[in-house]
């Protein structure tokens, strides 16, 4: 299957998944610069607590929501336009302290701008 601009689905998955892992690593390492390099300037997110955030996460927001580890699975990319894709996956996340683990279902909108895939929208829902 081909997407617009003759990019195959496997190539699209590879391009986005590599950037997604870099973004999660940035958050885990509390590195706002590397985290935000993968996020669009007009980013909007809905966090698992139901709060809405506009713009790239701040270092303070990252500090308030630290993680010590994560595992992503069931990664799926669906092209919805020439330079837009819907990305869904599950994230098993570990937090500091008592090393609490939780699972989230995540949906993201990715856009290709200036040749790079960026996260434009994020919604994370805690799983029971």
Image (cartoon, grey):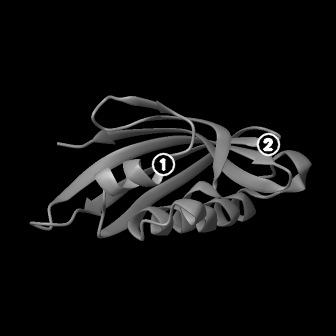
Q: Quadrant of the C terminus?
A: top left
Residue that extends furthest to the right in the rendered view of this protein: 5
Residue 11 position in % (x across, y down): 74, 64
- At label 2, counting other C-alpha atoms closer than 10 Å, the crowd grade (few under 14, some 14-19, many 20 or more) is some
Secondary element under disc 2, as helix, strand or loop, is: loop
Report x, y in % for residue 78: 63, 44
Q: Is residue 63 left or right of residue 1?
A: left
* Secondary structure at numbered mark 1: loop
Return the disc, 1 or 2, that comes first in the chain's sequence: 1
Q: To which residue does mark 1 refer?
A: 58
Q: How many numbered discs?
A: 2
Discs 1/2, front = 1
* Depicted 22 relative to depicted 76: above or below: below
Between the C-alphas of marks 1 and 2, the distance is: 26 Å
Give whichever of 114, 17 is nearer the camera: 114
Q: Which residue is drawn at 63% across and 56% down?
A: 38
Q: As drawn, which residue projects farthest toward the left?
A: 98
In depth, the one of 112 and 9 nearer the eye is 112
- Residue at 61% x, 68% y is 18
Check residue 83 in the rendering and tell me which mark sits there, or answer none: 2
The dot on residue 74 is: none
The answer to whether residue 126 is above or below residue 68 is: above
Residue placed most toward the observer, 74 or 112: 112
The residue at the point 78 percent across, 58 percent down is 8
């Amino acid at each position: 299957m081909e997407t617009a601009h003759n990019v195959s689905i496997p190539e699209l998955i590879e391009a986005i998944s590599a950037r997604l892992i870099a973004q999660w690593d940035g958050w885990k390492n509390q590195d706002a610069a590397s985290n935000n390099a993968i996020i669009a300037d007009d980013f909007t997110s809905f966090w698992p607590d139901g709060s809405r955030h506009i713009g790239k996460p701040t270092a303070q927001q990252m500090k308030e929501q630290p993680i010590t580890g994560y595992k992503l699975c069931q990664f799926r990319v669906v092209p919805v336009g020439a330079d837009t894709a819907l990305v869904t996956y599950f994230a098993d996340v570990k937090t500091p302290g008592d090393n609490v683990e939780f699972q989230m279902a995540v949906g993201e909108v990715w856009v290709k701008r200036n040749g790079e895939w960026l996260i434009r929208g994020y919604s994370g829902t805690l799983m029971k």
